[in-house]
Amino acid sequence: MINVEGLSKDYGTTRAVDDLTFTVRPGLVTGFLGPNGAGKSTTMRMILGLDQPSAGRALINGTNYRELSEPLRHVGALLDAKWVHPNRSARAHLRWMAAANGIPDSRVDQVLADVGLTSVADKRAGGFSLGMSQRLGLAGAMLGDPGVLLFDEPVNGLDPEGIVWIRNYMRALARQGRTVLVSSHLLSEMAQTADHLIVIGQGRLIADMSVAQFSSLAQASVIVRSPEPDRLAQVLGQNQITAMRSSTADGRPSLTVVDAPAERVGDIAAANHIALHELTPRNGSLEEAYMRMTAGAAQYQSGAPGQGSPGQHPQGPPPRSQFPQNQYPQNQFSQNQFPQGPFQPQGPFHGQGGHQ
Ligand SMILES: Nc1ncnc2c1ncn2[C@@H]1O[C@H](COP(=O)(O)OP(=O)(O)OP(=O)(O)O)[C@@H](O)[C@H]1O
């Protein structure tokens, strides 16, 4: 288990991590999600004792990383896949790591086999593709058979096969009861990999909830086509359901309902003898929900001149007062309550009823 408590990090005048508190539980893949510059890597480095917090602490199984005896037996990390001597073979690299950490040599061939690198174990690691380097990094992380694993953007630059492989590998580690924290700036990736999400923006906690709860934040809708759209809209209105005129992807006229499930729309149509030619439930886009949630928290985003562009380092996060006020009750989201405007990052949203 990882416990992050009131963790902050300042680099000069830049507050990279701002009073973060969260727990990463065993048996789950926890996605650590946030736009570029949100503070994910800095947080992971502090968990791994590579950076000193300005305030707060990060504990692994109740202990500070720097106080762990034989840390590789507790924590494995994949931070930079290319962190390997280019002229060493994969096997030599792992043997060197094992020797430095009091891990028996026999473990090296085990982890090489686990990640599918046995056949290239004696090849120069410098000649490895990114996918092979990621596997070697994973092998290094698994050397001490640790219960806690941290992966920083592990799918960056991988081809689809590599992405699926690493995703399955992380899920298998969690199923074995390990604690798995994996960072990404891609919600689509996390939605397929993680069970739980911790979302940060500008160093602050924005959301801490299961992927299922996060999904329910995305607004669902029902697409309806009928030869009698006006009468259908009218009877739906009589039932306090709003139907908006829309059109399907191929240009056919339709109605879109956001405040009732497909079953209710179908029942009302049937009760009023209105034929339906289509009744399609649609899940809201998770990506849209994520964009709304992190709006204003992205360090670099396209926007008006002066709002920050790639390569420009702003002077630090804006003060909290610049964010719009929260108009929504916390912890009370339902499918149809998700805010339409930019999500404000003042108060973290803690999912209820998630995994314990
Ligand atoms: N060594 C450093 N010195 C100064 N500022 C730093 C340092 N490391 C990180 N920062 C700043 O801290 C903030 C958080 O950076 P961090 O790399 O942790 O974010 P991230 O969420 O991992 O982003 P990315 O997805 O782009 O890697 C950024 O403003 C970054 O510029």
Image: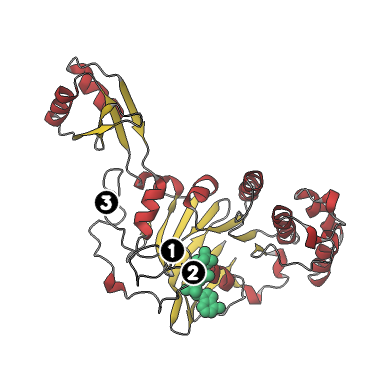
In the rendered structure, the answer to whether residue 284 lies left or right of residue 181 reads: left
Marker disc for residue 200: 1
**Among the two numbered marks 3 and 2 on one chain, the one whose residue lies closer to the N terminus:** 2
Task: Please name the residue shown 38% across and 65% down the image.
Answer: 297
- The residue singled out by tag 3 in the image is 340
Rendered residue at 48%/64% (across/down): 36
Is 232 situated above or below 26?
above
- On whether ligand 1 comes within 8 Å of the CB at mark 1, the answer is yes
How far apart are the alpha carbons under marks 1 and 3?
20 Å
How crowded pointer 3 is (Cα within 10 Å; few <14, some 14-19, many 20+) is rated as few
Q: Circles 1 and 2: CB distance less than 8 Å?
A: yes
Q: Secondary structure at mark 3?
A: loop
* Residue 267 disc label: none
Say whether residue 286 is left or right of residue 337: right
322 relative to 106, above or below: below
Q: Is mark 2 within 8 Å of ligand 1?
A: yes
The residue type indicated by label 3 comes to: Gln
Q: Which quadrant of the figure has residue 71?
A: bottom right
User: Is residue 73 visible to us here?
Assistant: yes
Label located before the other in sequence (1 or 2): 2
Nearer to the camera, 162 or 179? 162
Residue lying at the far bottom of the rendered structure: 12
- How far apart are the alpha carbons under marks 3 and 2? 26 Å
**Amino acid type at image mark 2:** Gly
Question: Tag 1, which secondary structure?
Answer: strand
Q: Which residue lies under the disc numbered 2?
A: 39
Task: Name which residue type carries label 1.
Answer: Ile
CA gap, disc 1 and disc 2:
8 Å
